């Protein structure tokens, strides 16, 4: 009797075999689509009953900022995790394909869209004639918007070059520009606010992007001991990043909503409602991170920690979308 090997795409029983990557790709697309609903539908839900007037194009701006934040998380997380992997002895050479060029392209498009809004005086352009590109050089917000566009373009070129690690500099420029944009000079203590936002944004990007790339890396490694060691090393650094994200987030919130009014504003303002939702999700993220750490240290198979870690990545994606929504909502405090 001659044994024949099933042809590709056909199971041993003669039935078509599904591609293992197709289901995962479909799941990712579904999650991305659901995350996009938060900035698109979130403004109307958050503003309902508050009496606050939304700015023009709030939903579109929130979506563009969500894409921009995600485009910052992915490459910074890759660079961070690759550095951690190189610090381990006996690390397997196989690393997953970089998503940095795609992230840079998405960030460039998002930054370009945001720059077009700034060029029309923070109004949604209805035609190319509405754009005043030259006017971008005349305002602080315009210059910062142009800096982000150019920085993502340079980051994409660096990601495709022989030295992809150099993209850390243009990505850092994007983070600095976002921090300065979020705190205008008319604000009380803008330098302190920008510093808090910069630390918050960088630590959150390293945390979320690093976990995503860590899970992608472990999927391609056959060495389970090395995989557990990498996840453990990431978990130790992530604990510090979580502490920094929490501290800067609380401090920034107290600057925008004083402690004697914060409970009222969390329910009566759009910004407060979105912030409250983000806090609840961050508690869930912290619980998932703790669960993963317990499994990593106590389970017979440490890599079972990947299950709560995958859930943590999904919730972090929702947090990124909420962060994009927060930047588009009116700030409740009056300086």
Image (cartoon, rainbow, N blue to C red):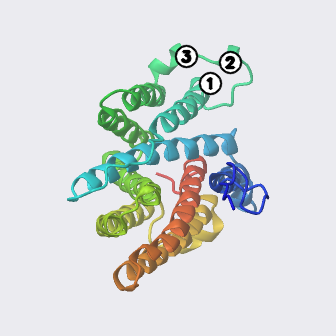
Q: Which residue is mark 2?
A: 130
Q: Which residue is mark 1?
A: 120
N-term mark: 2 or 1: 1
Quadrant for the N terminus, please.
Answer: bottom right
**Mark-to-mark CA distance, 2 and 1:** 6 Å
* Residue 261 visible (yes or no): no
The residue nearer to you, when weighing 160 against 52, is 160
In the image, residue 118 above or below residue 278: above
- Crowding at mark 2 (Cα within 10 Å: few <14, some 14-19, many 20+): some
| Quadrant of residue 173 within the rendered picture | top left
- Crowding at mark 3 (Cα within 10 Å: few <14, some 14-19, many 20+): some
Residue 210 location (% of width, % of height): 40, 55
In the image, residue 164 above or below residue 314: above
**Mark-to-mark CA distance, 2 and 3:** 10 Å
Residue 254 location (% of width, % of height): 42, 65
The residue nearer to you, when weighing 152 against 277, is 152
| Dot label at residue 133 | 3
N-term mark: 1 or 3: 1
For this orientation, the residue located farthest to the right is: 15
Residue 166 location (% of width, % of height): 29, 33
- SS for dot 3: loop
**Mark-to-mark CA distance, 1 and 3:** 9 Å
Q: Are marks 1 and 3 in contact (CB under 8 Å)?
A: no
């Amino acid at each position: 009797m001659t044994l024949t090997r099933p042809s590709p795409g056909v199971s041993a029983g003669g039935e078509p075999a599904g591609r293992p990557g197709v289901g995962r790709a479909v799941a990712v697309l579904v999650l991305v689509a659901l995350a996009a609903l938060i900035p698109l539908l979130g403004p109307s839900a958050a503003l309902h009953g508050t009496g606050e007037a939304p700015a023009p194009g709030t939903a579109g701006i929130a979506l563009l900022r969500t894409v921009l934040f995600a485009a910052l998380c992915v490459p910074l997380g890759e660079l961070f995790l690759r550095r951690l992997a190189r610090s381990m002895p006996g690390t397997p050479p196989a690393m997953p394909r970089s998503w940095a060029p795609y992230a840079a392209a998405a960030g460039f498009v998002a930054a370009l869209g945001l720059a077009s809004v700034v060029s029309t005086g923070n109004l949604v352009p209805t035609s190319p004639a509405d754009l005043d590109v030259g006017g971008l050089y005349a305002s602080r917000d315009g210059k910062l918007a142009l800096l982000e566009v150019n920085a993502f373009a340079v980051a994409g070129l660096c990601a495709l070059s022989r030295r992809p690690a150099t993209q850390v500099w243009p990505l850092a420029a994007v983070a600095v520009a976002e921090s300065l944009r979020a705190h205008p000079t008319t604000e009380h203590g803008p330098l302190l606010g920008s510093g808090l936002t910069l630390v918050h944004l960088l630590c959150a990007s390293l945390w979320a992007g690093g976990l995503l790339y860590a899970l992608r890396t472990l999927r391609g490694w056959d060495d389970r001991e090395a995989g557990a060691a990498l996840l453990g090393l990431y978990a130790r650094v992530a604990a510090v990043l979580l502490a920094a994200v929490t501290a800067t987030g609380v401090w920034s919130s107290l600057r925008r909503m004083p402690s004697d009014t914060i409970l009222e504003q969390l329910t009566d303002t759009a910004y407060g409602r979105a912030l409250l939702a983000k806090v609840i999700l961050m508690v869930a993220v912290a619980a998932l991170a703790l669960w993963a750490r317990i499994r990593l240290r106590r389970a017979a198979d440490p890599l079972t920690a990947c299950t709560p870690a995958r859930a943590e990545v999904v919730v972090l994606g929702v947090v990124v979308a909420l962060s994009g929504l927060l930047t588009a909502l009116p700030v409740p405090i009056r300086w």
